[in-house]
Image (cartoon, coloured by chain):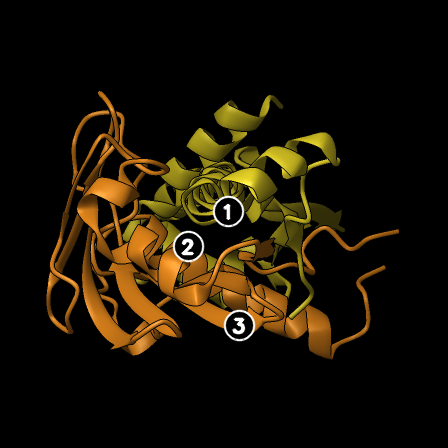
Chain colours: A yellow, B orange
Amino acid sequence: MEGGLAMDHAMRAVADPTRRAILRLVRKDELAAGEIARHFPSMSRPAVSQHLRVLADSGLVDVRPDGNRRLYRWRREGLRDAVTFVEEMWSDSLARLRAAAEREEWPERARAAKRRPPADTKETAP
Amino acid sequence: MTEPDAKVIEQTLRISARPETVWRYWTDPQRMCDWWGAAAELDARPGGICRVEMGGGPIMRGEFLELVPFERIVFTFGWEPTTGAPDITPGSTLVEVTLTADAGDTIMTLRHTGVAATHVDEHKSGWAHFLPLLTDAVTRATRTEPQP
């Protein structure tokens, strides 16, 4: 799926409190649809199934069949596009901050910097 | 293979300028507009507003929480709920900037994380829960074996 679209889907999927509650349930454990539905006694089974479908379509959960059951589990990669969006916003902006601060303090060094390859912008492991 | 989720929103840059200079690009509205946004309202003291209008786009609204001159800035980060703005509720995420002097340069590190789950209003939408989930994922990814 194209990045922006995937992010849109993921953001819409988590905008609903029921779906967020489902995500928390399947974050650590893989659960069958029936087990998930039992956590929402005031909601009809088809309504819960609809939420599960939205989560699966947006890539936020993985589904696999197990006999006549369907098992759901949180898919961490589903958040990746949203994270990438925030990361790109910062890396683009911070590169401009660096250029501006260097221009202000060291005009001659800033000119020299243009001659060397850019970017020691990097993601660091936690 | 690189585990795609084994990353946090953390970026580190070396800047050929002193921390005092870099600091001003976070606290002086005019300088902030040199790199981020078309207009900025910054009241750089704890509790002060940090509001940055992107040119023709969304408006970032935050609040300064912590300022250690030339070393550390912490502010909340969110978008005002306008059409087309990313769904990050003001107050729901946190940006921490640290500046470290190094041989005349500045090492600048930015971390962008969700706030503690207890501070998040359950009924607020989307991103308020997004980043906490993410940081949880990252923490777990670094503590446990890679998933098959």
User: Mark 2 near mark 3, Cβ–Cβ under 8 Å?
Assistant: no
Residue B97 as seen in the image, left or right of residue A5: left
State the residue position of label 2.
Answer: B130
Secondary structure of the residue carrying numbered label 2: helix
Secondary structure of the residue carrying numbered label 3: strand
Task: Please provide percent x and percent y for residue B5.
Answer: 67, 55
State the image quarter where residue B12 is shown: bottom right
Residue B146 as seen in the image, left or right of residue A15: right
Q: As shown in the figure, which amino acid type bears the numbered disc 3?
A: Ala
Q: Nearer the viewer, mark 2 or mark 1?
A: 1
Q: In the rendered image of this protein, does residue A35 appear above or below residue A71? A: below
Q: In the rendered image of this protein, does residue B94 appear above or below residue A72? A: below
In what quadrant of the picture does the C terminus of chain A appear? Answer: bottom right
Q: Nearer the viewer, residue B92 or A49?
A: B92
**Disc 1 versus disc 3: distance between alpha carbons?**
16 Å
Residue most extreme to the right: B1
State the residue position of label 3.
Answer: B101
Task: Please provide percent x and percent y for residue A35.
Answer: 51, 64
Q: Nearer the viewer, residue B100 or B120?
A: B100
Q: As shown in the figure, which amino acid type bears the numbered disc 1?
A: Trp
Q: Nearer the viewer, mark 2 or mark 3?
A: 3
